[in-house]
Image (cartoon, rainbow, N blue to C red):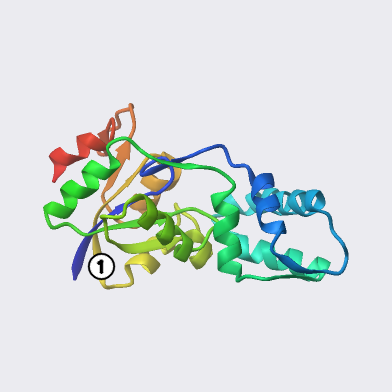
Amino acid sequence: MKEIILFDYGNTLIYEDIFDGYSGGKAIYKYLKQNKTNISENDFSKELLFLYSKAKEYRDMQIEVSFISMLEQLKKKYNLEFSISDLDIEKIYWDNSGKPRVVDGAIELLLYLKNKGYRVGVISNISFSSINLRKRLEELFCCIDFEIVVSSSDVKVRKPSKKIFSLALNKEWKALCFIGDEYNTDIIGALNANIKPIWITKDKISNIECVKDLSAIKRLF
């Protein structure tokens, strides 16, 4: 069985600006090729934001609602068609809803692990597809091969459910650890899946490996 080191995405490897879904909606509106109800750019963007707010109600139940499913709801409700694919729409929306920034020490740590021969992967609670999550990782970490990239959007469940981990590992991989910054999702999720957690935090908890930042992880490998 192949071994792998797993990471969370948001605030672990990447910081993102405050989510601006309204700007994302405006960015994709221009790709409408059919708009029989003449929904305005403003109303379209607000409607998509409303669906995002409704989706949050499911997250406490560890259920993910994907961006593409929200888009399909809008397309059906207003009889809309786009000139490009749903995945392309999703990427444009995400790219225009906030600017990503690599967390300090992330590139150095990933290169260190690569040079040591470790495989790495990402499991993320996010409404965007694994395909576009992988594209973003490739854009920001062009020298790193992420062998597992799984988003909750594709598997419909969120951390801390152990199901997202088992689906990601697929009986082919053994996770050496899961590295994340959120206790209630990343750390509890790893424990639920019987994976060693590494918590990026200033706190200290007995029986859990805690590190203050990514650079401190090197000493563990």
Give the quarter of the figure containing the N terminus.
bottom left
Residue 35 is drawn in which quadrant? bottom right
Relative to 150, is 88 on the left or the right? right
**Residue nearest the viewer, comparing 37 with 181:** 37
Relative to 159, is 53 on the left or the right? right
Query: SS class of the residue under badge 1?
Result: strand
**Residue nearest the viewer, comparing 217 with 25:** 25
Q: Amino acid at mark 1?
A: Trp
- At 49% from the left and 56% from the top, the residue drawn is 158
Percent position of residue 86, x then y: 61, 68
Relative to 116, is 12 on the left or the right? right
Percent position of residue 30, x then y: 71, 59
The residue most toward the right is 37
- At 43% from the left and 55% from the top, the residue drawn is 136
Relative to 103, is 43 on the left or the right? right
Q: Is residue 63 visible?
A: no
Q: Is residue 190 visible?
A: yes
Percent position of residue 76, x then y: 77, 71
Position above or below: 196 against 217: below
Q: Which residue is mark 1?
A: 173
